[in-house]
Amino acid sequence: MAMNAKSVTMRGVSKSFSNGKGEPVYAVSNINIHVEAGQFVTLLGPSGCGKTTTLRMIAGFESITEGELFFDNEKVNHVPPNKRDCTMVFQSYALFPHLSVFDNVAYGLKIKGTPRSDIIAKVRDALALMDLTGYESRMPSQLSGGQQQRVALARALVMEPGILLFDEPLSNLDAKLRLVMRDEIRRLQQRIGITAIYVTHDQAEAMSISDRIIVMNKGKIEQVGTPQEIYQRPATRFVADFIGAANFVEGTVVEISDGGAIIETPVGAIRTENAAGYKPRERVTAVLRPEAVRLVPKSTNVAVVTKSVFVGQVQEYEVELAGCTLRVTDHNPMENPVYQVGSTVSIEISERSVHII
Amino acid sequence: MNRSNVKSDPLLLFCIGLVMLCLAVFVAYPLFMIAKTSLFAADGSFSPEGYRRIFTGGVMLDALRNSLALAVVTSVVSTAIAYVFAYTFAYIRVPFKKLFNAVAILPIISPPFVIALSAILLFGKQGMISKHLLGLENADIYGFKGLVLVQTLTFFPVAFLVLAGLLRSISPSLEEAGQNLGASKWKTFATVTFPLTVPGIANAFLLVFVQSLADFGNPMTIGGNYTTVAREVYMQAIGSYDMQAGSALAMLLLTLTFVVYSLQKYWVGKKSYVTVTGKPESGRRMIEKGLLRNVMFTICMILSLSVLAFYILVPVGSFVKLWGINNSLTLDHYRYVFSIGQKPMSDSLKLSLIATPIAGILGMVIAFLIVRKSFPGKKALEAISMFSIAVPGTVIGISYILAFNQAPLALTGTAIIIIAAFVIRAIPVGIRSGIASLQQIDSSIEEASTNLGANQVQTFVRVVLPMIRPAFFSGLVYGFVKSMTAMSAVIFLISAKYNLVTASILAQVENGRIGVASAYCTILIVVMSAAMLLMNMALKYLNKGSEERPATLA
């Protein structure tokens, strides 16, 4: 299928309601986003962060209070939702229960007035793409969750839209199916080259499928970046905490050199390569991922193991050190010594993995 | 729940405008006229004469007092009977439950006269029981006694439905907890079950109260000298042409029903301690034996058989030449009904069949607008369309005469005014069931349709309507039944050009031609039953829709 992928730009977009007293309550404020044509971008954040509201503003189901929304160079603020060049895959799939699979997928084409023979061809192609050939006359109630999901996707794709929107499409599937569908969606998107904007609260999902992630919190954008940037260089404490697990250690910059800096913290002096822009005596927070900390036999610093749990792939620890509690994971418990609760150890911190915020 | 703004869809705006116009012209305007007439004399001066005439005694004040007394007594008795039925249903294992259920539902769909007519046939001057069984020469079923009997049997199903739903949904674990803590069965009932149902009792009481107040057909048929408000309004308006007094009385009736209805909706309705989900709790151990069971069963049985007897009597009476005097069987009455007397029947059918689809569609559109859209004036729309359910038919009737007897809307004597009355009476139920079924549809389905390019009307027709087909269809049938059996509103609106079967029945009863009245009634019962059967079959067929269907480009 030939796709006319479009870019999406939001400039200073806000959405507000007035509460009982006439004051505005902002669901999202000052959103600035640019999604290149053909890119897969995820809006990621906890419940209530505004990601779904933003998606719905793009689709046209929520009005835009302030700011501008562009598809390519066309301002679409006031284009009604049924005239926008984007189709959406809903969280509940929203298949029409009274129509067969075929009629569901053909629905949008019929509305558009596509000639009958074209409809048949396009629907057949879309169903084949989603591995649903042979299911044309089934009713939605006769399909499994995964199959319904694929019909919803076929229905959205057959319209050949400029932008494809996903509203937490996998949250109703079981864990294994979620993984399978996640890969399928990504593969499809890359093959077709369509612009995709995806909403989820599942960070693993976001990281595995996105070109870029937009992390949102309380209606604002916290950070935009690739999955690596988001994980390894979180811009704010929120992002560091929301994505993966994080240890936060407060400290003061004591020395800056070419190779990085030294931060004086309660758990010792932490050397890091990533300290650009910080000055001596500045109070900073060091972000230590659990996998960036290693437990070694007792040497320079003294930590007590307070939790030690074997979870199969990793050994999860909690250690107490100078009044701080650190989470540590060992990703190779078969090769490394395992420390029991109560034992005294030392910690080693990998310089490259420390991030300062 | 998602509500979208309508500014961008002109077709939708047009629909809204049309709906508002209909409601304004056919609900708001007539009610305004009746309020105005009751307070202003013909020359435009403020004059609450009508009210004064009522309250300074005489026939109208009596009517007011009578109506209230009747309503209270009827409500008490109905609620009590309904409670017995409902308790039996939910707590006791007895045979014939289907029979009891059918009997309890029957009066809802039958013409307003059947019970009253049967009462006359059984207990009247020539009554089967009064004269032939008991040998009373001048039995008088007319008046207060007869009204209580007839109204109770007619209205207790409403109370039954409320209480049955409530009792069924009480979790058995509450009563088990009571017993576990030492309470005897009786004490459990008194301290656990009964208190939980008190809001339901109040609810049922008020519902029956409203219906009794607004009842017109029964007091006209069997009221005798016991005059009620609805009847007096009719007398004043049609008989003495005292429109001021008539409308004042109508306003009082309206106020009364409105107050009671509000009480029921906003005060009692909010106080339920038990959520009625409609799903019966499984696992209740039913009472299987004992004195209680036998007593309840006997009561229910007697009542059910009596109600059934009442219904069978009317068809029987339609074949009797002169009830009580000449008991030979004859087809004369039917010959009359199908020849000279066929106009009321065909008029009723014609007008009902026109009104039904209008009411059905209008009801659905209004429900859709209320549930899914937001626009200025929406609260007014909601209020007016639901308000019309609290307005007694009598009030509608007289307000229509006042509103539409002169240009620019001179509609009296036409078919339009009757159809309008039918529609206004039928839509509240359609709206309510429409709202209920729409609320069950995830709004994302409609959003999906919009997202794929459909405008509002296309979404409504292609996606929403098919999904609410069962509710739509039952709304249609209900509308038809209600129109065919409409009495209190349309009695004001018939004319030489358009007569209605219910008005005819009344006229025949007043002329003592019970046989013909019974024949009309029987035909109505047959038509109603056919309609209900049709609905049942169609619903079964429609609900099968989830089976595999061949791919169509329909």
Image: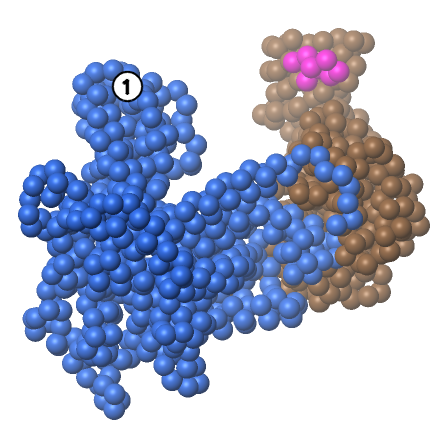
Chain colours: A brown, B blue
- The picture quadrant where one finds residue A61 is bottom right
* Residue B366 locus on image (x, y percent): 51, 60
* Crowd tier of the residue under label 1, counting other residues whose Cα lies within 10 Å: few below 14, some 14–19, many 20 or above: some
Tell whether position A311 is magenta: yes
Please report the residue visible at 66 percent of the width from the left and 17 percent of the height from the top: A317
* Residue type indicated by callout 1: Ile
- Residue B519, compared with residue B307, is above or below; it is below
Comparing B514 with B502, the one in front is B514
Query: Within the magenta stretch, is there residue A220?
Result: no
Q: Is residue A166 visible from the viewing direction of this image?
A: no
Indicate the secondary structure of the residue bearing disc 1.
loop
Q: Position of residue A353 (x, y in %)?
A: 79, 31
Q: Is residue B505 above or below residue B272?
A: below
Name the residue nearer the viewer: A320 or A334: A334
Q: Quadrant of the C terminus of chain A?
A: top right
Evaluate whether residue B6 shows in this view: yes
Q: Residue at x 15, y 62 (%)?
A: B227
Counting from the top left corner in percent of width and height, residue A316 is at: 68, 18
The residue located at (22%, 31%) in the rendering is B302
For mark 1, name the chain.
B
Instruction: Look at the image and give the residue range highlighted in magenta.
Output: A309-316
Quadrant location of residue A172?
Answer: top right
Q: On the rendered structure, is B438 left or right of A35?
A: left
Q: Circle 1 is placed at which residue position?
A: B287
The residue shown at (60%, 52%) is: B465
Between A251 and B527, the residue placed more toward the observer is: B527
